Amino acid sequence: EKFDVIVLDALDPEDDAEIADKLYTDDAFLTALYRSMSDDGVLIIQVGTAPSIHDPRADLGVYARREKMFKLLEDHSETAAMFVYEESHSRFYEPQSFLVVCKSNDCRKRWYAQPDEIDFAIYERIRDTESSEPALALFDGSTQRSYQIPPRAWETVYCRREPEPFECAYRGLDLTKEIHYFHGSDEEENSFEIKVTKSPSGKDETRVYAATDINKGDYIMASDLAASFTVSDESLDNLKKNAEIVGTGRLTVIEDLLEYIDRHGHRSVASGSSTNYVEVGGSFMIRRTNNEAEVNVGKWMPNHPSGKIPFYSPVYERRMRSFDVFLVATRDIEEGEEIVKPVNLWA
């Protein structure tokens, strides 16, 4: 029989007990758990006392057993996603931490569901109790929202690994770099100029030019990109279905919105995510090209050297939105030069 959910809550991995090695560092035991799970099964593990930002490198301290288990799971062929969260209502003196391990990328979409989605799912699936008391005393959609961003200490300890994980170099914008803003018609404050030119076919084209020198690594229209709105795959599907309803006439507003999203939106780089980001500031006017020689801006967060995002990374989980939207100059850009981004920027 396959299980959709397995909960491992025998003892803390830091406990000085022989069985702890079997539970937390035995690869054969962990593989047996995977084999007992359905294709989209979820494994929840109680992983002991929450870390502190003052903790040493995880494999050297009292949580070495927990770190070994994390790395076994990260390297396991059936792992698709890993999330860590803390809970202070466990009747211990300190918050306890828990690890969620998924066999399917679909788990990511459910983990990052909005509070209203979670509340609706609870309403549909929860059972009444004989006492008429709520079956869930502490959990609801807002509680799940609080789990979605791991506490800073997990990121800090993770980045003490040796060698330091690649993404740890991107824990916040580089304060030595300048942010170049687009302020509309305010020429004195603008780092960019908008010009309308004629295409070879005679159509008007809007293009963006540098109004000042921009150094490699400087941020391009960061405030505009931070204002990008998000829309889920489910919302897009609903909009498309609404536009297809017979008898309502041509729904120009919805059709135009869908066309705009298709043109200026992109999916999150997180595998399994259903989130799409849509540019609404001046950045949407930047021309795109397949000619790499013309390109002078790119993603702030480069693609991971491995070619994929790690299954477990508190850095990515904490900072995914920033990685999904911010752009930087990929080389020095001179005043008067056109700003150009690649067609496959977010691929």
Image (cartoon, rainbow, N blue to C red):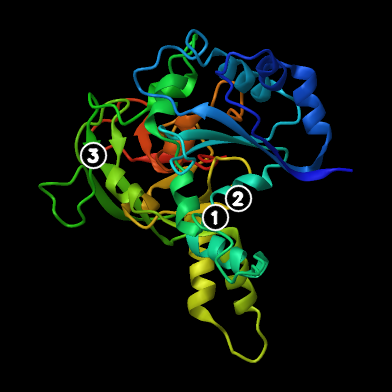
Q: Residue furthest right?
A: 1
Q: Secondary structure at mark 1?
A: loop
Mark 2 near mark 1, Cβ–Cβ under 8 Å?
Answer: yes
- Observer-nearest residue: 93 or 150? 93
Rendered location of residue 24, percent (x, y): 66, 21
Residue drawn at the location 59% of the way across and 59% of the way down: 233
Residue drawn at the location 83% of the way across and 33% of the way down: 35
Task: Tell us which disc is closer to us: 2 or 3.
Answer: 2
Left or right: 55, with 249 as reference point: left
Residue 323 in view, yes or no: no
Q: Which comes sooner in the sequence, label 1 or label 3?
A: 1
The amino acid pointed to by label 2 is Lys
**CA distance separating discs 2 and 3:** 34 Å
- Observer-nearest residue: 154 or 19? 19
Q: Which comes sooner in the sequence, label 2 or label 3?
A: 2
Residue 184 in view, yes or no: yes
Residue drawn at the location 59% of the way across and 15% of the way down: 65
**CA distance separating discs 2 and 1:** 6 Å
Q: Residue furthest front?
A: 131
Mark 2 highlights which residue? 109
Mark 1 highlights which residue? 113
- Observer-nearest residue: 129 or 109? 129
The amino acid pointed to by label 3 is His
Rendered location of residue 210, percent (x, y): 25, 40
Left or right: 108, with 86 as reference point: right
Residue drawn at the location 24% of the way across and 49% of the way down: 182
Q: Secondary structure at mark 2?
A: helix
Mark 3 highlights which residue? 180
**CA distance separating discs 1 and 3:** 33 Å
